[in-house]
Amino acid sequence: MNQLNKVAPITLLFWLMKIVATTLGETLGDFISQTMNYGYVVGILITLALFCTVLFFQLRADRYTPYKYWLVIIGTTTLGTEISDFMDRTLNFGYLWGSLVLVFGLLITLSLWFKKYKSIEVFPIFERSKEFYFWVAVLFSNSLGTAFGDFLSDNIGLSYVHGALVTGLIIFVVVHLHYFTKINHVLLFWIAFIFTRPFGATFGDFLTKPSAKGGLDLGTLNASMASIALIILMIFFEHRNYQKSKSAISD
């Protein structure tokens, strides 16, 4: 019996969904820890439980299922928000040292992945053990992206719009390197994957923060609900596209 792919294809829709998922992770994480006033420790426990639950069903699935996959992505972005804020504000690491710790964790994960499989290709993935490495790397990268986005706004002093422009420019450069150079595409994927996180996170802050701080002051709940509605719509389109591609292959 042939094994079936477990992860999403890397398309334009993938990147758009990743950005929306990171925006949702930022606003939902802040809603739990700040608006609901649970704090970062309880926030980590709540989001870790949610992440482990959706990851369990994703790992048990025998093939790529859009809603299961993207629920795990959302789980990593939400948990990543809590981890980054906990390291900075509770452990007092600061965003710079917190980012370095997360970089080290990501590099260790990718090194172990490469050591076992001689490759860190992110698509397709068939084996459950390789998929586990993938999700650990995704969690580290999303946590790192959160810390870097906060570093731009809190340490360097960029506005949320300027922070989004900086990370958006990095993503733009990576896209051009992918199409017009021979730089390793897996390396470029992880760079883009990391920087879509602060891009979406700074946009989430722009939606939720008070106008005095350069935000739209929509609040974490309203911003989260809007992001949830948008990601549901995008998952619907992803599911439809996936079904069409399967039908085309079978024909």
Image (cartoon, grey):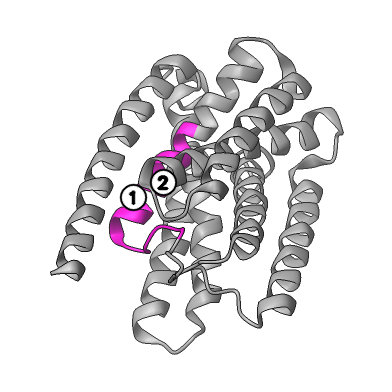
Q: Secondary structure at mark 1?
A: helix
Q: Nearer the viewer, residue 78 or 85?
A: 78
The N terminus sits in image quarter: bottom left
Q: Is residue 106 left or right of residue 241?
A: right
x and y, in percent, of residue 22 in the image? 48, 41
| 40 in relation to 245, above or below | above
Residue range in magenta is 6-24
x and y, in percent, of residue 30 in the image? 59, 23
Q: Which residue is mark 1?
A: 16
Q: Secondary structure at mark 2?
A: helix
Residue at (34, 50) in percent of width and height: 16
Amino acid found under the numbered disc labelled 1 = Leu
- The answer to which quarter of the image holds residue 235 is top left
Residue sitting farthest toward the left: 251
Give the overall secondary structure of the magenta segment. Answer: helix
Q: Is residue 185 visible?
A: yes
How packed is label 2: few (under 14 Cα within 10 Å), some, or many (20 or more)? many
x and y, in percent, of residue 19 in the image? 41, 46
Q: Is residue 219 visible?
A: no
How far apart are the two marked residues, 1 and 2, measured between alpha carbons? 5 Å
x and y, in percent, of residue 126 in the image? 51, 66
Residue at (74, 19) in percent of width and height: 42
Residue 191 is covered by the magenta coloring: no
Residue 18 is covered by the magenta coloring: yes
Labels 1 & 2 near each other (Cβ < 8 A): yes
Q: Nearer the viewer, residue 131 or 224?
A: 131
Residue at (27, 48) in percent of width and height: 238
Amino acid found under the numbered disc labelled 2 = Ile
The C terminus sits in image quarter: bottom left
Q: Which residue is mark 2?
A: 19
Q: Nearer the viewer, residue 78 or 49?
A: 49
